[in-house]
Amino acid sequence: MSCGKLLCGTLCKRTLGACEGGLIHVIWQECGPSAARSFISQTQTLVNYWLLQQGFTIGIADAILDKETTGVIDGIISGAKQDVQMLIQQGKGAESEAVFESKINGILNKARDISGTP
């Protein structure tokens, strides 16, 4: 059973992802779990072959942030710490511990997500 062919375009995390509307999700919905599993396996084989043919290297310099980026991330983290401190100073009040913890996690998760965005 053939579910279609990609005629052009770029395959990336957003288009391939298992989220709703992603290629893997559509294949699962329209062709079933076996076809989705086969697609994932064949895609991994294709990527492995490409990496063997093209090569891919990364050096330590590729993992070191420049001063400007480090400053931006430090600012985001500092802001999140201030927000958490303010929340702690306000106290839990009538909120349950789970709600209080959820608010703190929300602040910290947002800072993490913003910091990791290119």
Image: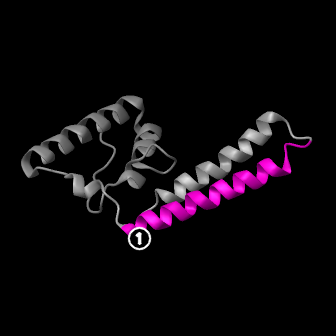
Under circle 1, the secondary element is helix
In the image, which residues are magenta?
67-93
Label 1 CA crowd tier, 10 Å (few <14, some 14–19, many 20+)? few
Residue 39 horizontal/vertical position (percent): 30, 38
Q: In the image, is 100 to the left or to the right of 49? A: right
Image point (34%, 54%), residue name: 12
Q: Is residue 91 visible?
A: yes
Above or below for 47 versus 66: above
In this view of the protein, which residue sits in the foreground, 20 or 83?
83
Residue 11 horizontal/vertical position (percent): 31, 55
Q: Mark 1 highlights which residue?
A: 68
Residue 41 horizontal/vertical position (percent): 27, 34
Q: In the image, is 80 to the left or to the right of 91? A: left
Image point (85%, 51%), residue name: 90
* Occupied quadrant, residue 61: bottom left
Residue 38 horizontal/vertical position (percent): 29, 33
Q: Quadrant of the N terminus?
A: top left
Image point (62%, 49%), residue name: 108
